[in-house]
Amino acid sequence: MSAARALDDADFDLGRVTSADGVAELARALYGEAFTPTPGVLHVTAIDGNTGRTLRIDERAPKSQADTFALNLTRARADAIIITGGILREEPALSYAPGAPGPESEALRAYRHHYGPSGPPLLVIMTRGAGLPLDHPVFHDGHTRPILYGPASGVLPLRQETDAEVIGHTGDAHLGALLTLLRERGATTISVEAGPSTTRALYAGPVPLVDELCLSTYAGPALEEAQLVGDPLRVPPELALAEPEVLTRTASGPWRFGRYRRR
């Protein structure tokens, strides 16, 4: 689908935004004038437009300030964020400070205070327990409230090693069960940031578990196999573009941005 509007990637430099209203204005520029931060299960991800596969996040990945803004906007809305232990191992400098990567953004902090939930979000780390880097900054920096979630036999012993909350399950717990648990604890906006092997469960059943997909699509030259991960993401028919996609121009090539919502 062709984009209706084209913007400069530099427009989404968070260093140029000074207020919650400024963040809201950028959100409307990226996702359309009708954008409002509604609750639900959110999935924000970046894919390669040539293959539909997820971009591997490392130093070789194509860069986009608009994509960084999209991720931060979703985090600013969330009561709870779901990741995996593998992400902590692969990204030792991962931070949930407003505006990360980069300097902390007072504008994003103000946006969360005005439009989002109060207090730091829950950060639910799906893990089997073994090899989890408990010295990772997310356990100590105060930007989230970490929870370890996994098989009881693997995660319950970690209670002796961390101050984070630990929830052990028995049997084959799945992403749907975790979403139900978080809703029961009062979370109304849940962002899933895990990789494709985990997030495929959002789309695998007869009815998608996701209410909103914020999709960043790199539309530049073909990437190498090492820059991609997982199978192609196929947007289910239950989700539709809320407004036409937006195109941004970056040094790495063009990007498209679309916000899909449950019909």
Image (cartoon, rainbow, N blue to C red):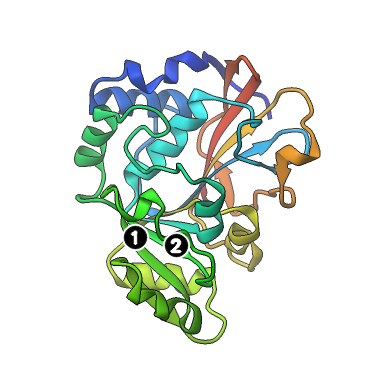
Q: Is residue 109 above or below residue 42?
A: above
Residue 41 x %, y %: 44, 56
Count of numbered badges drawn on the protein: 2
Q: Amino acid at mark 2?
A: Ile
Q: Amino acid at mark 1?
A: Pro
Q: Is residue 62 above or below residue 6?
A: below
Q: Are marks 1 and 2 in contact (CB under 8 Å)?
A: yes
Is disc 1 placed on a helix, strand or loop? strand
Q: Which residue is mark 1?
A: 146
Q: Is residue 160 left or right of residue 30?
A: left
> Which of 58 and 3 lies nearest the eye of the viewer?
58
Residue at point 54%, 53% (across, down): 89
Marks 1 and 2 sit apart, C-alpha to C-alpha, by 7 Å
Quadrant into which the N terminus falls: top right
Figure quadrant of residue 246: top right
Residue 32 x %, y %: 45, 28
Is disc 2 placed on a helix, strand or loop? strand
Q: Which residue is mark 2?
A: 125
Residue at point 45%, 38% (across, down): 71
> Which of 58 and 207 lies nearest the eye of the viewer?
58
Residue 235 x %, y %: 65, 49
Q: Assess disc 1: are there few (<14), some (14-19) or many (≥20) residues with their C-alpha within 10 Å of its C-alpha.
A: many
Q: Is residue 243 above or below residue 201?
A: above
Q: Assess disc 2: are there few (<14), some (14-19) or many (≥20) residues with their C-alpha within 10 Å of its C-alpha.
A: many
Residue 260 x %, y %: 54, 43
Say which label, 1 or 2, has the lower sequence index: 2
